């Protein structure tokens, strides 16, 4: 499996697509996820910290856009950190 990729299940499964990948939130509170394949709807999304910081992340879905948020207060210095994360999404 590739670092970023997708599996499209076709018409027998309603056109369901599962996408995964790695991204970085730069030193900002949130960042939109760039999917390998464009979609019309995101049904579910999960993002987890991929580095040593073990930061908690949140994901919001708005149609075909998913945005990942970090909690600035989880850092000991209350600073916004660059976070490397992994994601998986169920889309159509």
Image (spheres, grey):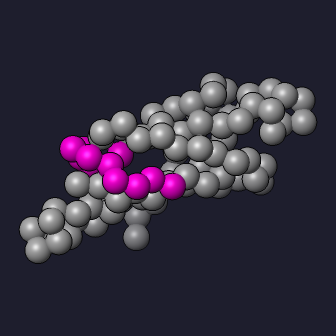
- Depth order, front residue of 52/90: 90
Q: Is residue 44 magenta?
A: yes
- Depth order, front residue of 3/59: 59
State the image quarter where residue 21 is shown.
bottom left
* Residue located farthest toward the left when viewing the structure as drawn: 11
Q: Position of residue 77 (x, y in %)?
A: 89, 29
Q: As drawn, is 5 to the left or to the right of 48?
A: left
Q: Which residue is rendered at x = 36% and y = 36% of the image?
A: 62
Relative to 31, say whether 14 is above or below: below
Name the image quarter holding the N terminus: bottom left
State the image quarter where residue 24 is shown.
top right
Q: Which residue is rendered at x = 75% and y = 31% of the image?
A: 72
Q: Position of residue 17 (x, y in %)?
A: 26, 61
Q: Which residue is rendered at x = 21% and y = 44% of the image?
A: 40
Q: As drawn, is 53 to the left or to the right of 85?
A: right
Counting the numbered discs, the total is: 0
* Residue located farthest toward the right when viewing the structure as drawn: 76
Q: As drawn, is 65 to the left or to the right of 73?
A: left
* Residue located farthest toward the bottom when viewing the structure as drawn: 12
State the image quarter where residue 84 is shown.
top right
Residue 45 in view of the camera: yes
Relative to 21, say whether 83 is above or below: above
Q: Which residues are magenta?
A: 35-46
Q: Position of residue 19 (x, y in %)?
A: 36, 58
Residue 21 in view of the camera: no
Q: Position of residue 50 (x, y in %)?
A: 65, 55
Name the image quarter holding the C terminus: bottom left
Q: Is residue 15 magenta?
A: no
Relative to 81, say whether 35 is above or below: below
């Amino acid at each position: 499996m590739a670092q970023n990729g997708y599996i499209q299940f076709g018409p027998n499964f309603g056109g369901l697509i599962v996408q995964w990948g790695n991204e970085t939130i730069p030193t900002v509170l949130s960042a939109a996820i760039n999917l390998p394949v464009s979609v019309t709807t995101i049904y579910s999304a999960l993002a987890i910290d991929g580095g040593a910081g073990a930061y908690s992340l949140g994901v919001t879905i708005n149609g075909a856009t998913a945005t990942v948020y970090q909690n600035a207060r989880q850092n000991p210095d209350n600073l916004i950190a660059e976070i490397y994360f992994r994601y998986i999404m169920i889309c159509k």
